[in-house]
Image (tube, rainbow, N blue to C red):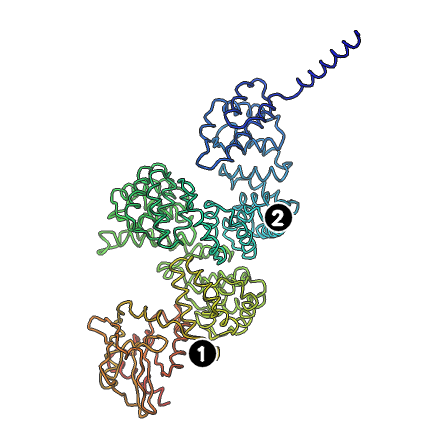
Amino acid sequence: MFRLRCGSSFLRRLLHGGTVNRDQVLQQLQVCAAEDQVLDVVGKNKAKLTVNHVSTAVGMLWQFQREKPQMLRTVKVIRCHPQFLTLRVLAENKIALMDDLTLVDMLYSFLRFNVDGHDSLVQQLVSEAWLRIDRLPMESLSKFSMCLSDLHLQNSPLMGHITSIVDQRLSSIDDARILTSLMISMSSLVSPRLRDALIGRAEELLDTMDPAKFNNPRRMVQFMRNIKHSYRPLLDKCNKIILINMSRLDAENISMIMGLYQGLQFNSCDFSLAVKPRLTELIDSSTDPHSFTKLFVALAPMASQEIRDGLENTALLLADELTPHQALAVAEALQDIQSRNLSLLNKIASVIQRNLHVYKPVEVARIIQALFLLKYQNPELYAKLRQILVKFMVCSVRPYEVTMLTRVLSMLPCQRLEEGVISRVEAMVTQCNLNDLNTISVAVAKWLRNEPSYRHNTPNKYVRLLQTLNRCGRERLQKADRLDLLLEELKYTTGEWFDEMLLDETMVTLKRMMDQIHWTNVPALCLFLTKINHICPPLLDRIATVAIKDIDKIHHWGIYATILPFSVLNYDSADELYDASIQCVTAHISSFEPHMLVLLGYTLALADYFPEELVREIFSIEFLGKLDAKLETLSDTLTMRTRLRLMELNRAVCLECPEYQVPWFHENYCQQFQKQGTVTASPMQQQIHNMLGEVLGGINCVRVAVVTPYFYTVDFECILDKRLQPLPYSGPSTLQISDRGKVHWGTSSEDTTRDVLPPGAQRVAVNFLDSKSFCKNSHHLRGNALMTKRHLEILGYLVVQVPHFEWNSMELSTPNAWKEYLKKNLFGQLSS
């Protein structure tokens, strides 16, 4: 009996001992259901807390926060709680005891609670992680890289070390989430070689990952936006996965994706058509300021007027609850849609004005730009914004920031510019790239025009600054040694200063780098040559050679950009390139965005190419319906341009390829253009009109601004009989140039109905060609002027083109010389 009691006593001690050995603090933490319970456990067990307890508590606090909607999070409340301070102190004291995973997780969680980067806890955690960096598993390395980005250390040697590790171990990364997080964090440090390797690995993982994880492709798109590299095959794959998950995306995710696509100039018809109804579905559930702001920014630009009015009414109700940054986002969206809702504008401006002390320099610049482009009138607000802007500018040491502030400052009225502003610009221009220099030159030109003494003499401060800009621009071009980087700087560089001061030097530099022309940079180079309207046979020949050789490597989207300068600049030595391009387009015809296919068809038509499969696709009922739906989601500018090009392509096909039997369906569209007001004749056109009247024996033998079938407008029209004698028109022309050079569209049937010509007579079209009809660096006729001539000849005209450089030449400096010139061109062609 005694032995039995002793055994029972031993068993109880054993069981009790097992209970004691259990981690009661950890158990208490694990059953917590809210932040206050976690903090209560911490407060009651301060002396017992181990590394594991601290790690668990901090991790749980953040987990509770991340599960809440943004507006319901209480990060600031938690951070200021006394027991959270206890956790910070304990964590700092136990850093040496943390394993690698715990160390990085702890840093990540504390940063989510906005613990300051200069705090000793954060600094010691970063230092310890750096010491262990070579042994960190890839998941921890990925999380650590995100922490460094949060601390603005993305360009640090430490991030460089991480980049080197990723480069060496890239093939071992099998998790798309880990890879994409690393890609974003180190995007500013990747070389072109590593960039391509990362994109290749991302493509591989995208094919094998769970398509429900849409954040992975979103981060891949973000990486490409960060490095300004639009790799279309990966973009297309990411877009497909995002489309699969459209029903799960909220307004915030959609808004973010739309911003990334816009930054990459990526247009997806399928995405546009899917995103609009999804955003419309979210209207009823987006009632708090955070979600509504995201919805408003994404939906307003593409919504119908009815939905847009509803969004503006809701914005008006929520305006007083908006944070400063939400108010800025709404202001920019209002600028996008050119809203005239004055009540809403006043409300948003009021919120912004109350919070001016909160905004950073970039945000102040965005506020000014949005309000200025909205033509919002509030002198008091503009004065305050200008004062803040100048204060930021004289202190800024970042070239891109000074450039942006300079551009926006030039929008605001000012009689005299502060010396500190000029000094700051002068100090920064030597560090600016070509695009920044060009932006500053435009601002200086505005300041110069507003200077009270400008009409009498140019102030020395502006002369000195312009001379510095010119010198820095030339030096940058002369030192340039990488074509890809140069093209990135030139992408948005254009304007009077660039054309006059740097264009020639730019062409010299591009020819010096011809051996660097590669299929990867051909589209960008072609877009630049088209933009500057500069024909350069050596460059175009080299482009054609490279493109023909690697046409299968150029993404089908890039074909449009590749052939653009050859068509627009009328370079006729590229038959092989056109043939190869048409084959590539035909093979991928179903993959093109509808508006892009229209632009491509027009570009080919300029060069007199009309591939039947392409023409039949564009003018099919199904395609035109899809195009209409797509145009509803594009900007007004791109929509107008696409509709114009569709009309011009329709006209070209009807005139040049009647065998395709494509109907002409732009009559109403063209009539609307015809009714848009008055056309002003230039002094040269007025002069030609008078001279033609004298040459032909009377002003009643000349018609002005004649609208032809298919709605070409001929500057002047006359009819010569078989003996080359001018025939007077049967009635007075309804289109005549007034003394002030105004040409008014008539409404009589004469404008569109052609008179029956006598046998042997010839209708003659005389068109004055200004500088826009020619390449900038030569007298070479552009493609659109040549196509116009071709079409007028099909319509039965003898076309006489009068180039501006001939009419204004020294040889034609007297009335008699002008008359002889017209006689030679009018009668010489018919008699030959």
| 624 relative position to 758: left or right | right
Q: With respect to residue 131, does 671 lie above or below?
A: below
State yes or no: discs 2 and 1 in contact (Cβ < 8 Å). Answer: no
Query: Mark on residue 656?
Result: 1
Residue 310 is at least partly visible in this image: yes
Quadrant of the image occupied by residue 706: bottom left
Q: With respect to residue 739, does 48 lie above or below?
A: above
Locate residue 620, reporting x and y percent: 48, 70
What is the CA distance from the residue labelled 2 to the residue labelled 1? 50 Å
Locate residue 454, reporting x and y percent: 24, 54
Of residues 168 and 180, the one nearer the viewer is 180
- At x 62%, y 21%, the residue is 24
Query: In the image, what residue type sits under mark 2?
Result: Met
Residue for badge 2: 209
Residue 486 is at least partly visible in this image: no
Locate residue 643, reporting x and y percent: 40, 66
Secondary element at tag 1: helix
**Mark 2 or mark 1: which comes first in sequence?**
2
Q: Residues within 10 Å of mark 2 (few under 14, many from 20)?
A: some
Query: In the image, what residue type sits under mark 1?
Result: Glu
Q: Residue furthest top?
A: 2
Q: With respect to residue 635, does 99 lie above or below?
A: above
Image quadrant containing the C terminus:
bottom left
Q: Residues within 10 Å of mark 1 (few under 14, many from 20)?
A: some
